[in-house]
Image (spheres, rainbow, N blue to C red):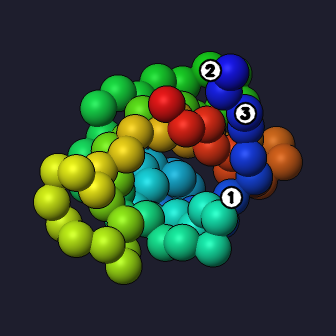
């Protein structure tokens, strides 16, 4: 079962806030977004499925993880679900 967690995200903001996530902190570890596999918008929300590498780990494929990250515009907050 997947659980949703509130996280802090560093993001790229171009035409609007939260155009795409660049990195985030989860469970006291920083993750760098290596790739965005999918993104979509729902009313008041921006969703991203991302592939990450741990900032303190090796940059090899064995260190990669997948997450769904969501930005909630009204609350100005982010959540994460590990995939």
- For the residues labelled 2 and 1, the Cα–Cα distance comes to 19 Å
Labelled pair 3, 1 in contact (Cβ < 8 Å): no
Q: As drawn, is 47 to the left or to the right of 42?
A: left
Residue, far left: 60
> Residue 49 location, x and y as percent?
42, 33
Contact? badges 3 and 2 (CB < 8 Å): no
User: Mark 2: which secondary structure?
Assistant: strand
Q: Name the mark nearer the viewer: 3 or 2.
A: 3
Q: Is residue 46 above or below residue 20?
A: above
Q: Which residue bears the numbered disc 2? A: 42
Residue furthest to the bottom in view is: 56
Upstream in the sequence, badge 2 or badge 1? 1
For the point 36% across and 79% down, the residue is 56
The residue where tag 1 is placed is: 7
Q: Residues within 10 Å of mark 1 (few under 14, many from 20)?
A: some
Q: Which residue is mark 3?
A: 3
Which sits in the foreground, 40 or 25? 25
Q: Give 71 or 1, whichever is nearer the viewer.
A: 1
Image position, residue 28 (x, y; %): 63, 73
Write the residue at 73% across / 37% down.
4
Q: Judge left or right: residue 75 versus residue 53.
A: right
């Amino acid at each position: 079962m997947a659980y949703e967690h509130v996280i802090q995200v560093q993001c790229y903001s171009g035409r609007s806030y939260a155009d795409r996530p660049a990195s985030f902190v989860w469970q006291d570890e920083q993750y760098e977004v290596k790739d965005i596999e999918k993104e979509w918008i729902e009313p008041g929300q921006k969703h991203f499925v991302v592939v990450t590498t741990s900032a303190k780990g090796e940059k090899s494929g064995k260190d990669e993880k997948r997450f769904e990250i969501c930005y909630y515009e009204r609350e100005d907050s982010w959540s994460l679900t590990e995939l």
